[in-house]
Image (tube, rainbow, N blue to C red):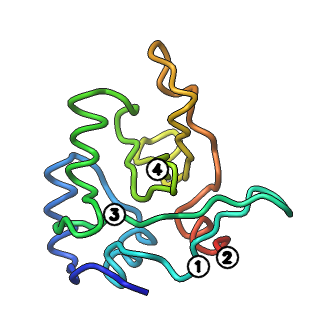
Amino acid sequence: MEISEPIYLEDLIKVEDELNIKFSSDFKEHYIEYNGGYPERDLYPWNDTETTTINTFFSIKYKGFGNVESTYKDLVILEQYLPEKIMPFADDDGGNFFCVSFRDADYNHVYYCNNDHYNVIDNEEYLTFLKGSFGEFLNCLI
């Protein structure tokens, strides 16, 4: 697995403060271990026959594999393309996003954002629920 430069808990705390979010423990553990890159298990199984290939996990602090902070600022804060506190952390080969929620109502849930189904009026509409936690999402990858 090719990964980005390492980060530490202090780096994650700075990003949390900067973006006004609170990372889950499974998200923190994953990023401290890998910090973005090309995953070995890169297929998300939709069902028994269909999968989506994860191109890359975005990195934190560094820009070698895309960057969580700049992607969040661009898509959530500036463009309001994604709902507030929905953070893209990976993309597929088609440029669609895998996102994790840091909202109270669906904290740590993982969604797929298919850009082909974007709705200008309701940016929640094109989020497809995948898993109830970031850890569950990681565990289902093949």
In the visual, does 51 lie left or right of 61?
right
Tag nearer the camera, 1 or 4: 1
Residue displayed at 34% across by 63% down: 58
Residue with the mark numbered 4: 99
- Residue type highlighted by circle 4: Cys
According to the image, label 3 marks what residue?
58
Q: Position of residue 86 (x, y in %)?
A: 40, 42
Quadrant of the image containing the C terminus: bottom right
Q: Is residue 65 left or right of residue 87?
A: left
Q: Nearer the viewer, residue 26 or 89?
A: 89
Real-space Cα distance between discs 2 and 3? 19 Å
Point 40% across, 31% down: residue: 83
Q: Nearer the viewer, residue 82 or 131?
A: 82
Of the two numbered discs 1 and 3 on the same chain, state the one appearing first in sequence: 1
Q: SS of the residue at dot 3?
A: loop
The residue type indicated by label 3 comes to Phe
Is the residue under label 2 in contact with that under label 1 (CB below 8 Å)?
Answer: yes
Report how far apart the C-alphas of labels 1 and 2 lie in the structure: 5 Å
Indicate the amino acid at tag 1. Arg
Q: CA distance from mark 1 to mark 4?
A: 17 Å
The residue furthest right is: 48
Residue 114's image quarter?
top right
